[in-house]
């Protein structure tokens, strides 16, 4: 078969909702796009552990402490599932981690914002995980099999994250004056970065949308962002808090909420590495990896020794 | 002003966007833990089913890692692990000759046979 | 309050404090582990011991409220007592150090905890017995996990071996305290010492490590005489409860 025929057969499978599996023929660009997306997604989970892990030692009750630890640990699990999916495309975990640690690979910019108060744990769970879930639910149907399966597993676990975030804010919103202020402040700080998670506006994209054609992605940035705004604009009423956008308003014609303009200069700067915490996040990942090197080496050395011992015994 | 804006998704951030990127100076370790495939029995009486993969230094650690990673929500009661390199898989290119010849053997399926309603439980 | 109910409360708090402070320390590894799989593994242990501490505190709160007509909760016990009130073993509050020190501390502690809980299980107090039964299942895994790491690192590379020796040197002096009974404990505690040593020796043999001898032992944790580290652990852990008194979270 010529490459052209293979490509046609490939697109035909995609159009018929047949999943692509690791050993199947796929265009090189499809492999690369998936590898980049899946690994960036994995890195986002791993770096995402840091801003929340930051508050584990200070969680204000034992129940909240246990919930937060379980949540951050889930993110480690999600990173692990996704790294495994990326490995099916031919890149080793080591290489993936090296790319993150060297700054070559990217992760979601949202995790370069600091978690300043306890209320941020709630706001991150509700807004950041809420935004992530919209993407992730869509990705459960993505065309690459291992990615879709990882996402199904992740989505099952993720809904607890958003719920606990909202519930935690709900308690603050009914608490003391200081707690209510803390709650509003966290929402104010996390709202715009959460909207940025969906990426640039569709109209400003210069790429032809190969990702949609290949069904790696099934909804545009603006569609997902609008879903998110519509959802949050309703939920916030239950908290008795406000979103920091004077232009947020229900539009009866569109049957959607209108909302204000994102600060794109900030967006691109955080992507480029100029966010408040880019350096700390990478430094923390590098430190953990470097300090773990001797541990990983020792475990392998011991495994080798034991294998040899067993061999000698058998002989 | 002409600003090039590329499409950017959650989990799809353009490469090379960073100003602070440092060259990849780390050397890949020769002591990296191998990859394992994990199979789990979710409850007594069911087959072991592929649950996912992980890294571990040896089989014992792979089982324990599988316990720690894949049974956090009581998903399993029995674990198998096998080092990924020992899995042999059929080739998708063989699909036609492997799987399609059985398509016309409809007589292998019970629904192929029309029986009078009076014959029950067959 | 009579002496025995007072003792039971102190003893229950002691058990809760050990679990909580060790959990607080182990939690520092979350997001910073040497490899993803082990980050997840140690965090499971963290969640287990924090769960144990909550069980003990809830029972202690029940005991205290019954005799003193107070409104103590698991959280007031964890967040509103001071450095001198905490009764945890010194071992639990020590900094994590490297992975070698962390897994060795876990192994020492879990091995001791298992012996202690086996006794609690058959003891006269139904509540403590029930908590022990539930916890022993967790502890058995903690011993397996940490013991295997002690062996792996002890008999791994030259560097890991040296780091294990270093960890043994740092931690051994905090293990004598396990077996010295505080006035709220039964004096037959000393009987556990040989069993503990035996288990440690088995693992050390496999790990090519030597059990230290004639080490002067540090004590005081059980009666609130702590290392300087505990104050920092508590001020971090308790900061929100102290800053916003009476708030619900």
Image: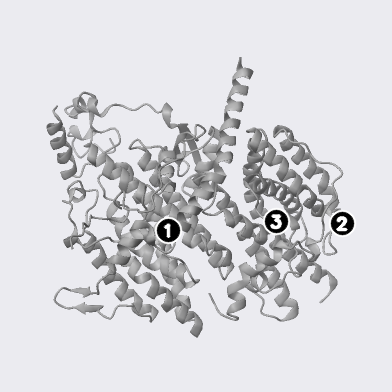
Q: Residue furthest bottom?
A: A177
Marks 1,3: beta carbons within 8 A: no
Q: Is residue A265 above or below residue A314?
A: below
Which residue carries the number 1 mark? Answer: A278
- Residue shown at 57%/67% (left/top)? A58
Where residue A86 sits in the image (x, y, percent)?
36, 42
Which residue carries the number 2 mark? Answer: C187
> Callout 2: few (<14), some (14-19), or many (20+) C-alpha neighbours within 10 Å?
few
Chain of residue at mark 1: A
Mark 3 and mark 2, same subunit?
A: yes
> Callout 3: few (<14), some (14-19), or many (20+) C-alpha neighbours within 10 Å?
many
Mark 1 element type? helix
Marks 1 and 3 sit apart, C-alpha to C-alpha, by 31 Å
Where residue B110 sits in the image (x, y, percent)?
23, 33
Q: How is the image coloured?
A: one colour
Q: Is residue B73 among the parts visible in the rendering?
A: no
Q: Earlier in the sequence, mark 3 or mark 2?
A: 3
Which residue is nearer to you in this view: C3 or A42?
A: A42
Mark 2 element type? helix
- Residue shown at 43%/27% (left/top)? B86
- Residue shown at 66%/64% (left/top)? C233
Chain of residue at mark 2: C
Where residue B10 sits in the image (x, y, percent)?
31, 56
Mark 1 and mark 3, same subunit?
A: no
Q: Quadrant of residue A185?
A: bottom left
Where residue C136 sits in the image (x, y, percent)?
67, 51
Front: mark 2 or 1: 1
| Quadrant for the N terminus of chain A in the image | top left
Which residue is nearer to you in this view: A51 or A26?
A: A51
Which residue carries the number 3 mark? Answer: C94
């Amino acid at each position: 078969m010529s490459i052209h025929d293979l490509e046609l057969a490939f697109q035909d499978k995609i159009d018929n909702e047949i999943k692509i599996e690791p050993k199947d023929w796929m265009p090189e660009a499809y492999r690369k796009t998936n590898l980049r997306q899946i690994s960036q997604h994995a890195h986002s989970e791993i770096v995402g552990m840091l801003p929340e892990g930051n508050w584990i030692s200070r969680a204000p009750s034992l129940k909240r402490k246990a919930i937060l630890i379980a949540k951050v640990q889930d993110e480690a699990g999600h990173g692990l599932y996704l790294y495994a999916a990326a490995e099916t495309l031919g890149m080793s975990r080591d290489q993936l981690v090296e790319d993150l640690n060297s700054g070559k690979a990217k992760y979601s910019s949202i995790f370069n914002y600091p978690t300043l108060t306890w209320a941020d744990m709630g706001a991150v769970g509700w807004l950041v995980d809420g935004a992530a879930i919209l993407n992730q639910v869509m990705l459960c149907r993505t065309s690459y099999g291992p990615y879709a399966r990882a996402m199904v597993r992740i989505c099952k676990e993720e809904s607890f994250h958003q719920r606990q975030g909202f519930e935690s804010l709900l308690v603050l919103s009914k608490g003391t004056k200081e707690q209510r202020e803390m709650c509003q402040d966290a929402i104010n700080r996390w709202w715009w970065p959460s909207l940025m998670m969906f990426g640039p506006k569709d109209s400003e994209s210069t790429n032809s949308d190969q990702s949609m054609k290949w069904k790696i992605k099934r909804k545009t940035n603006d569609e997902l962002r609008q879903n998110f705004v519509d959802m949050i604009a309703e939920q916030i009423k239950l908290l008795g808090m406000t979103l920091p956008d004077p232009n947020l308003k229900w539009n009866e014609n569109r049957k959607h909420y209108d909302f204000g303009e994102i600060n794109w200069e900030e967006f691109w700067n955080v992507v480029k590495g100029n966010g408040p915490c880019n350096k700390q996040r990478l430094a923390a990942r590098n430190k953990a990896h470097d300090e773990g090197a001797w541990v990983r080496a020792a475990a392998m050395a011991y495994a080798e020794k034991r294998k040899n011992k067993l061999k000698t015994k058998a002989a | 002003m002409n600003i090039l804006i590329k499409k950017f998704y959650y989990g799809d951030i353009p490469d090379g966007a960073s100003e602070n990127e440092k060259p990849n100076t780390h050397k890949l370790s020769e002591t990296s833990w191998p990859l394992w495939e994990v199979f789990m029995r979710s409850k007594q009486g069911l087959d072991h089913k592929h649950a996912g993969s992980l890294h571990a230094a040896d089989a014992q650690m792979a089982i324990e890692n599988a316990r720690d990673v894949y049974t956090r929500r009581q998903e399993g009661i029995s674990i198998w692990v096998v080092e990924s390199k020992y899995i042999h898989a059929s080739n998708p290119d063989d699909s036609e000759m492997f799987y399609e010849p059985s398509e016309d053997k409809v007589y292998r399926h019970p629904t192929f046979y029309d029986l009078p309603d009076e014959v029950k439980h067959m | 309050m009579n002496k025995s109910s007072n003792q039971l409360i102190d003893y229950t708090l002691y058990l809760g404090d050990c679990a909580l402070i060790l959990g607080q320390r182990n939690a520092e590894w979350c997001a910073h582990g040497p490899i993803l799989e082990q980050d997840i593994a140690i965090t499971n242990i963290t969640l287990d011991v924090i769960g144990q501490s909550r069980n003990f505190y809830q029972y202690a709160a029940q005991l205290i409220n019954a005799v003193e007509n107070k409104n103590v909760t698991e959280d007031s016990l964890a967040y509103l007592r001071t450095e001198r009130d905490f009764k945890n073993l010194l071992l639990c509050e020590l900094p994590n150090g490297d992975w070698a020190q962390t897994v060795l501390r876990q192994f020492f502690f879990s091995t001791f905890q298992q012996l202690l809980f086996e006794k609690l299980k058959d003891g006269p107090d139904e509540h403590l017995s029930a908590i022990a039964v539930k916890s022993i299942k967790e502890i058995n895994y903690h011993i397996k996990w940490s013991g295997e790491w002690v062996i792996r690192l002890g008999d791994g590379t030259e560097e890991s071996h040296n780091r294990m020796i270093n960890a043994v040197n740092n931690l051994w002096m905090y293990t004598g305290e396990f077996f010295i009974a505080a006035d709220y404990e039964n004096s037959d505690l000393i009987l556990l010492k040989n069993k503990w040593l035996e288990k440690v020796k088995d693992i050390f043999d496999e790990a090519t490590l030597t059990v230290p001898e004639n080490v002067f032992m540090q004590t005081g944790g059980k009666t609130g005489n702590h290392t300087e580290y505990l104050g920092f652990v508590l001020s971090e852990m308790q900061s929100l409860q102290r800053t916003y008194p009476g708030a619900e979270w």
